[in-house]
Image: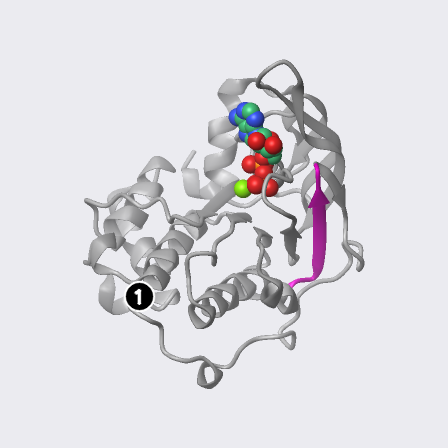
Amino acid sequence: MIAAAQGAFRSGDVLIQLHAVSKEFQAGPEPVRAVQQASLTLKRGELVLLQGPSGSGKTTLLSIMGCLMKPTRGRVWVGGQDVTSLGEDKLPSLRLQHIGFIFQSYNLFPALTALENVKLALRLKGYGWRERRKEATELLDRVGLHDCMSRKPGELSGGQRQRVSIARALCGATDIILADEPTASLDTATGLSIMNLLRDECVNGRKAVFVVTHDPRLERFATRVDHITDGVLTVGAGGSNNRLEETSTRMLPAEMPQEQSA
Ligand code: ADP
Ligand code: MG
């Protein structure tokens, strides 16, 4: 089977569901309760923000949602599949096909160009070279990097690097985008332009986007704002019935100052 054909979940709109998820780390005499009894749902068309102080469990929760880590207790479903009962060997392919990650530090390969970084992700997903070139070019075009495809990360601004990592996260028809402080290294205008891109993926691509952030200015983009303190999650108002629509908040290009160089 061609990897591309596996891209989209065929199940309904619920893409991630956590039920009473807890995670404890054994580091020293007392276990660290990083996440305690967290339950949430993430649906197609939602853009959810997760806010909380440093050390409150945000990255741990995101890692569990992204199948990078199994919870100590509780259940996790991704695309209707019970991840907690899946073997460790099945998780990498589930992640690869359905989940795109975006990090504060971009995590790009410095020796590869923007185009090569995205093509490599497609190669891992099993795409042939012609498809890789076509899809990587289209995605980089879509995130506004038409003229920078042959530049390496060191030759790009912070905002441009984050756009490459978004293109990489979107490639291969990913349904779910999980982002850990994606705008934290960027100036306000660039951060907002990155959020616009993620918002467009929710509206037009009908994807689900979950963003960990400290930045209250991003709240206007969200269908829901969740909070976590000392590992205890409070799911925000609006339930999970809100969807981003074409008319919802978007910064107009004219409102945005030019991106600063890195
Ligand atoms: P945040 O992303 O909100 O800053 P984290 O999820 O990274 O918080 O961490 C939550 C808590 O779990 C912190 O107390 C942190 O020190 C602890 N923690 C995270 N990862 C590990 C680990 N691998 N081993 C031990 N403790 C950890
Ligand atoms: Mg963190």
Residue 13 in view (yes/no): no
Relative to 65, 101 lies left or right: left
Residue wearing tag 1: 145
Q: Which residue is drawn at 39% across and 55% down?
A: 167
Residue positioned most to the bottom = 254
Quarter holding the N terminus is top left
- Residue 116: percent from left, percent from top: 24, 48
Q: What residue type is labelled 1?
A: Leu
| Range covered by the magenta-colored residues | 222-230
Relative to 245, 147 lies left or right: left
Q: Which of 73 and 229 is in front in this view?
A: 229
Residue 25 in view (yes/no): yes
Give the quarter of the image for residue 22: top right
The number of numbered badges drawn on the structure is: 1
Q: Where 224 falls versus 250 (above or below)?
A: above
Q: Which residue is drawn at 59% across and 67% down?
A: 217
Relative to 260, 47 lies left or right: right
Q: Which of 169 and 237 is in front in this view?
A: 237
Q: Residue at x 33, y 71 (%)?
A: 260
Q: Residues within 10 Å of mark 1 (few under 14, many from 20)?
A: many
- Residue 256: percent from left, percent from top: 45, 80
- Residue 127: percent from left, percent from top: 33, 41
